[in-house]
Amino acid sequence: GQQVMQIPQYQHVQEGEDFTTYCNSSTTLSNIQWYKQRPGGHPVFLIQLVKSGEVKKQKRLTFQFGEAKKNSSLHITATQTTDVGTYFCAGMSSGAGSYQLTFGKGTKLSVIP
Amino acid sequence: NAGVTQTPKFQVLKTGQSMTLQCAQDMNHNSMYWYRQDPGMGLRLIYYSASEGTTDKGEVPNGYNVSRLNKREFSLRLESAAPSQTSVYFCASSEAGLQETQYFGPGTRLLVL
């Protein structure tokens, strides 16, 4: 079945440093979604990427979808303590009229003030 | 709007006991989902309901049953709880299917002794 690998599992950064998490799928995706989960909270949708090579920005967050639609990344510039949490990618594949959404295991970000 | 609500927030069960986790959404969404989240495992789909009156198995359905009571409500039942079902359970909804943004509830923390 479809597998979505996410690295790194953990990342500790000093406040102000940049942060990147990577997501790789074993199969070609129709789209990829990114979610953020604060400690003790629930996942919150950040963005969806659909097109090959797509790049989207949300303030200090930059999301990329690979040309082959098998990988994606989330980059945070100049991290802040409010960025603390676990970031999940979720890869969508489709076929025979059905959809499958597979979550990566997440990257837990700690920001040291 | 409350969004997605879940009850209870916490539950402790003994092995073999049964219980039902309740979920409701007030966003008039067609699709609803149940996930479990275990440390280091990300989110795994248990069951989903693409629309009122339909339910389908996800990645890890064994030991669970679901009921889509109406468009608003989607319940998850554990008939005979096992320690392996200790987890955090999240309900989610989307407008129409997995390819749409999912909105998550606050979660139910379940401990099975």
Image: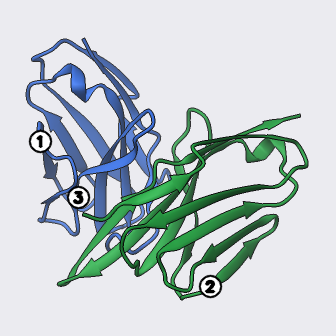
Q: CA distance from mark 2 to mark 3?
A: 29 Å
Mark 2 lies on residue? A54
> Position of B40 compared to A107: left or right?
left
Residue type highlighted by circle 3 = Tyr
Residue at 27%, 39% in the rendered image: B22
The chain identifier of the residue carrying mark 2 reads A
Quarter occupied by the C terminus of chain A: top right
Marking on residue B48: 3
Q: Residues within 10 Å of mark 1 (few under 14, many from 20)?
A: few
Contact between marks 3 and 1 (CB within 8 A): the answer is: no
Residue B8 placement (x, y as % from top left): 35, 29
Amino acid marked by disc 1? Asn
Helix, strand or loop under label 3: strand
Q: Residue at the location (38% across, 72% down)?
A: A92
User: Dot 3 falls on which chain?
Assistant: B
Chain B appears what colour? blue
